[in-house]
Amino acid sequence: MIIKAEWIVPMKGDPIFQGAVRVEHEHIVHAAKSSELLPQPGEEVLDLGSSVLAPGLINAHCHLDYTILRGCIDPHNSFAGWIKSINALKRDFTTEDYVKSVNDGLEMLIESGTTTVANIESFPEILPLLGPPPVRTWWFLELIDVRNRNFDETSIIGILSVFDQHPNWLGGFGLSPHAPYTASPALYRLAKSCSERLQMPFTTHVAESVQEHEMFVNARGDLYDLMKSLGRDCSDCGQGSALSHLLEYGLLTHNCLAVHMNYLQDYDYSALSELGVHIVYCPKCHSYFGHRPFELERLRQHGVNICLGTDSLASNNSLDMRAEMREARLKHAGLTNRQCLEMVTLNPAKALNQEGRIGEISDDALADLVAFDMGIHSNPYEAIIESHQRPRLLMVNGQKIDSSND
């Protein structure tokens, strides 16, 4: 099959005007000028006209379980207050509600051109009730032990074994110790060990709020009080940043996606660079909570790999990666359209150890593709970011996915 478009954005290389991509089965064979890529006898040709064809977008951090919470929680002055609100709401939902929530979230991803998502799964019991996800999904099992929830290697591997029963599911799996304030060093150590032995990524929330910063740096604040009331041993607080708390125990490695990282100390930046930790920045969630400016440029100067994510609809109003790119560009004047696209293609592919497979249009890469109308734009990068309509084409693993209301 050959797909033609006014512009092809391969990401590794310059955009191709009047380009074409050949797809065979689940792989991209080649991309070039359409005049150089002639169809073979009987080969299907899809001409998308005035559109831009790009790698499918990658959402590096999402909670599909909480799609059901869209518009339910107003922004709080206290992060601890937001946690209390979300925990109170969660108790009212059934297993069926969460299954519907995940499916609704997957449909939102399709509608906005996302072909890969890193999803935190808080309720692994719903997995056997789900059908094959229409997009490439990494399911990260959430781990929390602040309330004496027992996890050991056997129980974690048992839960992860559900993936062995679904060989047709695209993507992979991983572990997600929730955050330094809800997961003990022992639980992080277990997640790190399992991730290394099973060769899978892991992800965690770190330095998300000023209250978390106060908890670890100063041993005080609303979050500190809440965690202490839940029985957390807070003797590790008052000794440095939330990030340094994890680094001190050697709990972060190059295969970790560290989410948020909004409140860092000066000494944190070089440590991140040395370890090769990947960071997931969630611009619209960042705005929802009114956090201090995200140190994007400083992190880039230290060579840190930065990806974008939406977080959940408990702190966002969409799962659209184009909206995240627009928000990032609005907040960071020096950020180019090309750099925005890198944070939803090449960078998260690297973080998921999928370089050369997703996030780019190149020979032998997986055929995860999205096409948007060029509209009034002459620049293909800008056309993608400024798009608000459903994709002209969405393809996952070489298969066209219906993203229309028809």
Image (cartoon, helix red, strand yellow):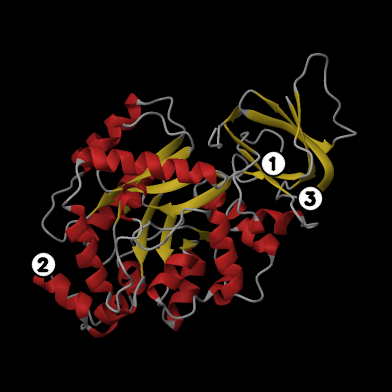
* Label 3 element class: loop
From the top left corner, tell me how far across and down residue 379 is, in percent.
78, 57
Near-viewer residue (273 or 299): 299
Q: What residue lies at 24% left-to-right and 61% top-to-bottom?
A: 86
From the top left corner, tell me how far across and down residue 367 is, in percent.
63, 34
- What residue sits right under mark 2 in the picture? 230
Left or right: 162 as drawn, with respect to 30: left
Left or right: 147 as drawn, with respect to 406: left
Q: Amino acid at mark 3?
A: Pro
From the top left corner, tell me how far across and down residue 298 is, in percent.
56, 77
Q: Answer whether residue 303 is visible to the viewer in this image.
A: no
Mark 1 crowd level (few <14, some 14–19, many ≥20, 10 Å Cα): many
- What residue sits right under mark 1 in the picture? 361
In this rendering, is residue 327 above or below 96? below
Q: What residue lies at 35% left-to-right and 68% top-to-bottom?
A: 247
Q: What residue lies at 90% left-to-right and 34% top-to-bottom?
A: 35
In this rendering, is residue 245 above or below 144? below
Q: What residue lies at 42% left-to-right and 66% top-to-bottom?
A: 285
Left or right: 202 as drawn, with respect to 183: right
Left or right: 65 as drawn, with respect to 184: right
In this rendering, is residue 202 above or below 83? above
- What residue sits right under mark 3 in the picture? 15
* Distance between the alpha carbons at the discs numbered 3 and 2: 53 Å
Q: Amino acid at mark 2?
A: Leu
Mark 2 crowd level (few <14, some 14–19, many ≥20, 10 Å Cα): few
- Earlier sequence position, callout 1 versus callout 2: 2
- Quarter of the picture containing the C terminus is top right
Near-viewer residue (28 or 73): 73
Q: Quadrant of residue 187?
A: bottom left
* Distance between the alpha carbons at the discs numbered 1 and 2: 49 Å
